[in-house]
Image (cartoon, rainbow, N blue to C red):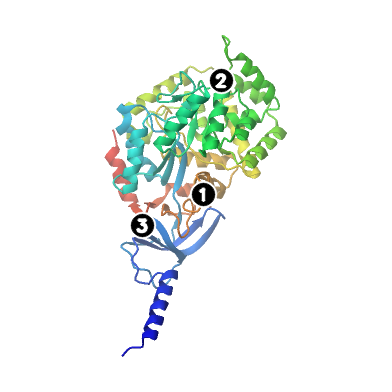
């Protein structure tokens, strides 16, 4: 007869072993071997690593050994470079119901450029966007993980269709109620008509509810006021730039006094005065304030430069235009027409402004401000192609003075930090989402490596370069 005590001891040992290390025969969905893992947080390479994935999550990470764990699929990276999938932290899905399909067909463009997560910064297709992300999560639709703000909040007579228009505290409360009912990921505020009081009131009310806020700011508000109210991120650099003027308070006062008159002063009318009064010492104080308040910044340098070049650039032969629905391309006409009507002086100023914006980036980085890479791609933003535009944004950040490693953080771990998901996403480690990008070359040496994709893994699902090309071919319009 077997010894009961020995049987109990053996069972206990087996249970203990199961709680610490999975058995060698545990099947994984995917195992990648011999990968040079890019550590975006330290800017270093971990050579010859093995990554085991199950259920869309990295379960093991360590040195490649002779004994490879059993998996449904094994991929020998052969010394290629494995980095986290990219995050585009400013895109738009919009244009009304007639453009739902045209917007959905943009999803493969993101994956094909290594983007596994996007942040939708407000539009009028919220029900469709929510359905896409359900299908993506369920594996029925190929596309990036989508964070969304749902409809934007703005003032009465808002420029963008679908905006929630607010002025009074009660209207703000109802707008936030509706966004919470939609289960949006954050609140996006726009400044086409919103008043100073409504803007600050929206930020303050959202802060009390624990809702993250980002946005354009009316020039009737100072950046310090917005950050103090709880603004979590400033979209674009126009608003940070205004705070770098040593006359911000007086300029803001003049702008406020002009409201309600026959000639109210808006952002673009005020920019030359802001430019003339830019002060490096004021800029440094502003950057420290943003870091202390933990207010992130989304520079969107690429679209600013593209629009500055728009009057003199012919985009009619762009290769990526073949993947843009003609109905969506038609939304480019307004910006294009406006660009062609610009005076020579305006064109020259826009180029100067782009150079000044780039000059802000090293100071923001040095101060510890959370920088988020965003392309601003989507309907109405002429020739800002999904996917390629984010790579252009990263190039602009390096041109501005960031190292490749610093630029990569703006499009990986920093996005996860913004959404408080850095423990589960944004870098390569056990327990984190299996959103991965396998490259032929080292992106820490040159960001040109991002244009040499071998494989994309999104939520554990593997897409070879050939499969990504097939997906693009399926949505090609011409």
- Residue 476: quarter of image: top left
Q: Secondary structure at mark 3?
A: loop
Q: Position of residue 257 (x, y in %)?
A: 63, 15
Q: Secondary structure at mark 1?
A: helix
Are there few (<14), some (14-19), or many (20+) residues within 10 Å of tag 2? Answer: few
Q: Does residue 342 appear to the left or right of 368 in the view shown?
A: left
Are there few (<14), some (14-19), or many (20+) residues within 10 Å of tag 1? Answer: many
Residue placed furthest toward the bottom: 1
Q: Give the label, 3 or 1, closer to the camera.
A: 3
Q: Position of residue 172 (x, y in %)?
A: 49, 27
Q: Nearer the viewer, residue 275 or 161?
A: 161
| Mark 2 / mark 3, whichever is N-terminal | 3
Are dots 2 and 1 in contact, CB under 8 Å?
Answer: no
| Mark 2 / mark 1, whichever is N-terminal | 2
Are there few (<14), some (14-19), or many (20+) residues within 10 Å of tag 3? Answer: some
Q: Nearer the viewer, residue 124 or 269?
A: 124
Q: Which residue is mark 2?
A: 346
Quarter of the N terminus within the rendering: bottom left
Q: Secondary structure at mark 2?
A: helix
Q: Which mark, residue 413?
A: 1
- The image shows residue 145, relative to residue 83, as above or below, that is above
Kindly tell me whether residue 298 is visible in this rendering: no
The residue at 52%/22% (across/down) is 168
Quarter of the C terminus within the rendering: top left
Q: Which mark, residue 60?
A: none
Q: Nearer the viewer, residue 200 or 409?
A: 200
Q: Position of residue 359 (x, y in %)?
A: 62, 36
Q: Position of residue 64 (x, y in %)?
A: 44, 68
Q: Which residue is mark 3?
A: 55
Q: Nearer the viewer, residue 22 or 88?
A: 22
Mark-to-mark CA distance, 3 and 1? 21 Å
Q: Give the label, 2 or 3, closer to the camera.
A: 3
């Amino acid at each position: 007869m077997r010894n009961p005590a020995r049987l109990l001891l053996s069972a206990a040992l087996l249970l203990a072993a199961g709680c610490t290390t999975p058995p060698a025969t545990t099947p994984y969905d995917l195992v990648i071997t011999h990968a040079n893992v890019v550590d975006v947080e330290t800017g270093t390479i971990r050579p010859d690593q093995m990554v085991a994935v199950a259920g869309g999550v990295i379960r093991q990470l360590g040195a490649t050994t002779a004994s490879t764990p059993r998996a449904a699929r094994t991929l020998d990276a052969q010394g290629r470079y494995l980095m986290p999938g990219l995050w585009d932290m400013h895109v738009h899905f919009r244009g009304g119901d007639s453009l739902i399909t045209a917007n959905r067909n943009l999803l493969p463009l993101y994956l094909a450029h290594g983007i596994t997560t996007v942040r939708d910064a407000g539009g009028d297709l919220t029900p469709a966007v929510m359905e896409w992300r359900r299908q993506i999560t369920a594996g029925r639709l190929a596309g990036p993980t989508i964070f969304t703000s749902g409809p934007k909040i703005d003032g009465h007579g808002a420029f963008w269709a679908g905006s929630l228009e607010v002025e009074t505290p009660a209207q703000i409360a109802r707008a936030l109620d509706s966004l919470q009912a939609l289960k949006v990921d954050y609140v996006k505020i726009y400044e086409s008509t919103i008043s100073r009081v409504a803007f600050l009131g929206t930020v303050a009310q959202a802060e009390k509810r624990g809702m993250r806020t980002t946005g354009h700011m009316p020039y009737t508000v100072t950046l310090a006021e917005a950050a103090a109210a709880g603004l979590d991120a400033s979209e674009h650099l126009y608003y940070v730039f205004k705070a770098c003027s040593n006359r911000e308070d007086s300029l803001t006062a003049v702008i406020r006094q002009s409201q309600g008159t026959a000639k109210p002063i808006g952002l673009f009318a005020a920019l030359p005065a802001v430019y003339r009064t830019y002060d490096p010492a004021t800029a440094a104080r502003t950057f420290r304030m943003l870091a202390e308040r933990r207010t992130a910044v989304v520079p969107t340098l690429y679209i600013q430069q593209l629009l500055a070049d728009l009057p003199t650039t012919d985009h009619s032969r762009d290769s990526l235009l073949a993947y843009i629905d003609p109905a969506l391309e038609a939304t480019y006409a307004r910006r294009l027409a406006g660009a062609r009507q610009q005076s020579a002086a305006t064109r020259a100023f826009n180029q100067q402004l782009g150079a000044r914006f780039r000059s802000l980036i090293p100071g923001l980085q040095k101060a510890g401000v959370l920088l988020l890479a965003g392309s601003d791609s989507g309907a109405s933003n002429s020739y800002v192609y999904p996917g390629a535009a984010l790579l252009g944004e990263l190039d602009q950040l390096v041109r501005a003075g960031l190292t490749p490693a610093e630029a990569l953080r703006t499009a990986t771990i920093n996005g996860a930090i913004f959404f408080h998901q850095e423990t589960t996403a944004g870098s390569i480690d056990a327990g984190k989402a299996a959103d991965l990008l396998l490259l032929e070359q080292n992106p820490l040496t040159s960001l040109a490596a991002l244009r040499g994709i071998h494989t994309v893994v999104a939520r554990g699902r593997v897409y070879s370069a050939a499969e990504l090309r097939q997906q693009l071919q399926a949505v090609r319009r011409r």
